[in-house]
Image (cartoon, rainbow, N blue to C red):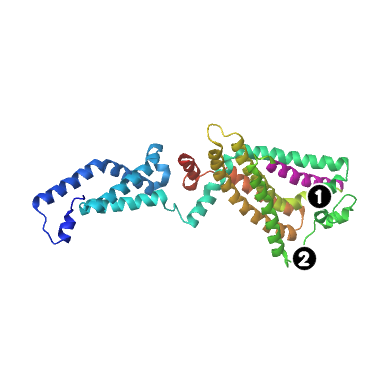
Amino acid sequence: MKAPTIGSWFTRGEIAAPADIEGAALRSDRFRLEREGDWRRLEQIVIRMEKGGLRRVDDEDLLALPTLYRTAASSLSVARETSLDAATLGYLESLVQRAWFQVYGPRKGFFAWFSEFLLGGWSRAVREIWLDICIALFVCVAGAVVGWLLVAQNSDWYYRLIPIGLAGDRGPGASRETLLASLGTEESTSGLSTFAASLFSNNAGVCILAFALGFAFGIPSLMLLVHNMAMLGAILWLFSEAGLIVEFSAWLSVHGTTELFGILLSGAAGLHIGRSMAFPGERSVLEAASTSGRRSAVVMVGVVIMMVVAAILEAFPRQLVEGAQNRFIIGGTFGVFWLTYFFLYSPRGGMVEDLDDAERLA
């Protein structure tokens, strides 16, 4: 049978005896003393998290956080049920509310997340998959070389690598004038915005496919990179034979330094997941895939941005800017920008630590 509380006596219109009031106070003090250590520890963890996020909390406190939160929530429930003193009840309500927000609440808004993503999170994620980028780069170069050599040996390989719809008038046997005309500029911007949207859709599709195929241990991602770069190698051979390798390289560089970099990163992101699943180390396969997947997802969000930039460059500057020198300047500027951002720009703080924090909680 449940013992009557102070509140229930007043509810029934009865007056509590001094001994009963003293007993209730003693129970409140005992309840608080037995649990106050955990409450204070939880409060200190919450204060550190409110000031600086997870990076201010050591691993031991981070692991204890869920248990301490549940203990405080249970204490709050008991305090409400037994009508403990108002000070204890108010303290617990405030503590549990703040702790709930740190355990389950949103960490930051979209704009805060996006600014931290651009100001360090994306470049950090790219650097962390450097080995996969090196492997993907080797495969890309090898694919371009293979494409060149195959077409140089037998020109029939050109149409096996390049779809007829994509080749158009550009093919073995085409005159130098025809090939040079395909590198020309447009007189107006009419229709280029629609062209840009189409290019973005196509390029983003290739990147997402290269990333998604990484779950098959990364092998299909590498094969897709080989196929795309073999196409590039075949086209390079075609313009080289016509003595237009410089003009074509300039034409390609306008958007290519961004687009090809994005394709390289998407293949590397897919390979990163596949490699972690094939060689999980001491972790389980699911745990390894989860950790690498979070990092690769950050890379892929950035790749989508790169594809938007590449589509705009391909539809406008490439179609409107004349001269190999001017085109090389545009392409080179973006190439230097991406290399600097990914491999030299490395701020600390914010989202830069979020991936590490996720791994600590995994």
Q: Is residue 216 magenta?
A: no
Determine whether, in the image, residue 180 is placed left or right of residue 192.
Answer: right
Residue 261, label in figure: none
Magenta span: predominant SS is helix
Is residue 259 at all visible to an observer of this figure?
Answer: yes
Q: Is residue 228 magenta?
A: yes
Kind of residue indicated by mark 2: Glu
Asked which quadrant contains residue 277, the reply is: top right
Give how far across and how far down residue 63 sits, in percent. 40, 39
**Depth order, front residue of 276/317:** 276
Residue tagged 1? 162
Determine whether, in the image, residue 295 is placed left or right of residue 42.
Answer: right
- Closer to the chain start, of discs 1 and 2, is 1
Residue 187, label in figure: 2
Is residue 329 at all visible to an observer of this figure?
Answer: no
Cα distance between the residues tagged 1 and 2 = 28 Å
> Residue at the location (74% across, 46% down)?
228
- Furthest residue toward top: 282
Other-residue count near label 1 (Cα within 10 Å), few / some / many at <14 / 14–19 / ≥20: some
Asked which quadrant contains residue 187, the reply is: bottom right
Bounds of the magenta span? 220-241
What number of labels is visible?
2
Determine whether, in the image, residue 147 is placed left or right of residue 12.
Answer: right
Give how far across and how far down residue 36 sits, in percent. 25, 43
Q: Secondary structure at mark 2?
A: loop
Determine whether, in the image, residue 310 is placed left or right of residue 281.
Answer: right
**Depth order, front residue of 4/281:** 4
